[in-house]
Image: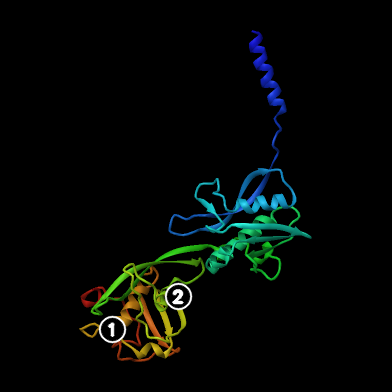
Amino acid sequence: MKRLYAVLLCALLLSGCTPSMNTISARVMCVRAENTVGAGELVMETRKLPELTGVELYEQLVSELAKTPMGEGLSAAMPSGVRTQSVTEAGGIVSCVFTDKLAEVSDTVRSRTLCAVTGTLCAADGVKGVLVYAGETPLTSEPLTPADWISDTESLRVVTYALTLYFPNLTQDGLTTAVCEVDLRADDEPALAVVETLLSGPVTDAGYIIRFIPDGTRINRVSVENEICTLDLSAEFLSKNIAAPDGTSLTVYALVNSLAALPHVTQVRFLIDGESVESYIHPHFDQPISPRTSGTIVG
């Protein structure tokens, strides 16, 4: 019995000596993933954090941006590989210095990250604005506030598109395909990304470069209306034509088939420097062109 009392007494003493950890509720921005391929929109998640104040709290909030959220279907807002170097505060302005990796991510991902950092820190008491650096490079000329972003952050929602690209095969007697993933803001036009990707000459899984659009070709405009994509290119586009043995223009149909692989495009209208023109590279170059999926067009 004495032994039992001793055990209970020790337990009571130990429990009384253990300091209680006070917590606070803090709002941290994270990313809501979608059912489709994509990164989703920025949303706030409420988390329990240690009761900290000042720079210690700001450091904790920034570190939370890289942690896996508690909510189902959510992911961290901080890009993978980006680390925090320092967090300081002066006059209500918090300066966050991250590693150079933040300057290497895409513009859309970087914009979303700045929004997440700003929204999370400015939700804390005493923070008036945020300065962000990638190494020694300032990413903001003036302190950012939530007013610098639209309230629902819809324009910063990043979506990953898996683009199906058509291009002339190595023997240039037909077309073959490759899938290329690109990150776009939700309000960007994926048709523009298709043309820009083909123009840049991406590397295929087989290791060779897709480059069939004539050198010097510039994109004047890409728009989609009523499922017709209007593609306005510079005159250099007409300087070269890759044709299959039957005379089918692989140059034209590589673009048409790539754009028509998008769910909201069924035809492509070509303009040259804003004008509809006739050209030998296609008998109906001045009219909307539908994709080809038979004969020599697919090798």
Q: Seen from this angle, which residue lies furthest top?
A: 1
Q: Which amino acid, by three-letter code, is at mark 1?
A: Ser
Circle 1 residue:
249
The residue sitting at 28% across, 72% down in the picture is 176
| Nearest the eye: 211 or 145 | 211
What colour scheme does the image use? rainbow
Q: Seen from this angle, which residue lies furthest right?
A: 91
Which badge, 2 or 1, comes first in the chain's sequence?
2
Q: CA distance from mark 2 to mark 1?
A: 21 Å
| Nearest the eye: 246 or 154 | 246
The residue sitting at 66% across, 17% down in the picture is 8
Residue 186 higher or lower than 284, as above or below = above
The residue sitting at 64% across, 54% down in the picture is 62
Residue 238 percent location from the top left of the image: 36, 89
SS for callout 1: loop
Circle 2 residue:
192
Q: Which amino acid, by three-letter code, is at mark 2?
A: Leu
Residue 144 percent location from the top left of the image: 68, 65
